[in-house]
Image: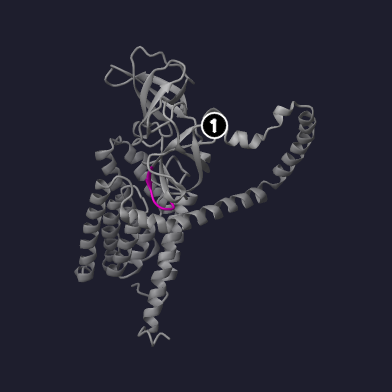
Amino acid sequence: MKKHLNTKTKIVFALAVVLAAVTAIVAGLCAGATPGQSAVQTILSPFRSGFSSMTRLAERYYDYIFKYESLEAENRQLNERLSDMEEEVRSADSLQRENDRLRQLLELSDDHEDYHYAFAYIVSWDSSNYKSSFTIGKGTNAGLSTGMVAITEYGQVVGRITSIGTNWATITTVLDSSLQISGVIASSGYTGIMHGAYATGNEGKLRMDYLPMEAVIRNNDQVVTSGSTVYPKGLIIGYIEDADFDKTGVSKYAIVEPAADFDNLEQIFIITDYQTG
Amino acid sequence: MLEKLHITARQWKTGIKWAVYFVLFLFVMLFQTVCLGNVRFFEVSCNFLPVLLVCICIREEPGSGGLFTLIMSLIWCLSGADFGSISIFVLTIGGVFAGILCRAVINQRFLPCALCCLVVALVHESAIFLLKLLFNGVEPIFWLKRALPCALLSMVAYPLLYLLVKWISRIGGNNGV
């Protein structure tokens, strides 16, 4: 066995220790992406985007091949409904003939005229069992920067950009315990701090801490962002699922079901600019 | 043309072999993060890269396999992997020792290699879990809920990766025992 531990092997061991220490120290000192990460992620970004496009294409073919009969039946039903709906549309008021698709996609623009958006597709997810983050195929070249908020087309909070490069950005989702958001229960006005709850065994949920003892918390109460220089006010975070006293006994906490559907997330919108207050 | 570049045919084939290993690594990394990144099996995500890198270390000479593992785990770390620094250390050391063990004591057959891959994958996940326990306050029960299932689930790809690495290692001559 000793003959296999030659000079080359010992050098590899030493390099492994040194590189592990250097990368750990540099990652700890740098906020956001390190220069090495930036370079590697910039090179990987087009590969990820290409792979992601091929995956979506393969999923479409899979759906076509294996769901053809059900799709055919659904198509017949939809055609019947379409002809019924065409009758309804013809007799509707002219104001109801607005572009339904654009309004559904960017409904927020009517409510928040001060928001500016950039959209992006998700190209890869962090495969860690302890983190919840993903990478998009846009970066500083699209006017994005660290700290910007990502939402769905329905105004549901997805997360924040935590590191960025020229053509990529990593978004840490609200499910990650490292991300904290100030939230408010819409019906009662009680505020608290929210973060991902995987560390307490509630994976896929959020935990809202520091709620006052006297707070009356009901199931399905909507929780929204309270507004700050980081998060615009009024974005939907989730809905209360459970509540209890915390270990200290001086405050309450609530378990919140996130509003965004993370399992089926493909495209997100980044708020690039908004007015506070 | 190779003579003009002072490269022998064997060196050329060896270069091709390592290039194919790199392409395989890249494919597995992209597949894991793009296709399976948001997919959970029994509430756990898979990590096939430790299995692949250990297979390569076992098949190749310890120094070369270790160097390749070092570079690939560095790329993995810089691509944004969670606690990637510990991956550089664990995968390189673990991979080289697995390779030495298979050459010196046991053999490079399917089952002994599988055992080595499982041990290294388990050590890797346990190391990450330990750091999460120390720095992020994860509950100890998460070793049973996340680390152990992740290592076991990652072995699902072992048969395919073992065969692919075995086939690639034959390019340029067999370096195995």
> Over which residues does the magenta segment extend?
A162-168
Q: Chain of mark 1?
A: A
The residue beneath circle 1 is: A108
Tell me if residue B106 can be seen: no
Q: Is residue B38 left or right of residue B71?
A: right
Q: Where's residue B143, x and y in %? A: 32, 41
Label 1 SS: helix
Which residue is more in the foreground, A270 or B31? A270
- Image: B163 above or below A159: below
Given the current orientation, which residue lies at the most extreme bottom position? B3
Q: Position of residue A3 (x, y in %)?
A: 21, 71
Of residues B123 and A261, which is closer to you in this image?
A261
Q: Is residue B70 visible?
A: yes
Q: Residue at x 77, y 28 (%)?
A: A88
Residue A165 falls within the magenta-colored stretch: yes
Quadrant of the rendering where the C terminus of chain A is positioned: top left
Task: Please name whichever residue, B59 or B7, is drawn nearer the observer in this view of the structure.
Answer: B7
In the rendered image, residue A14 lying in the magenta stretch gets the answer no
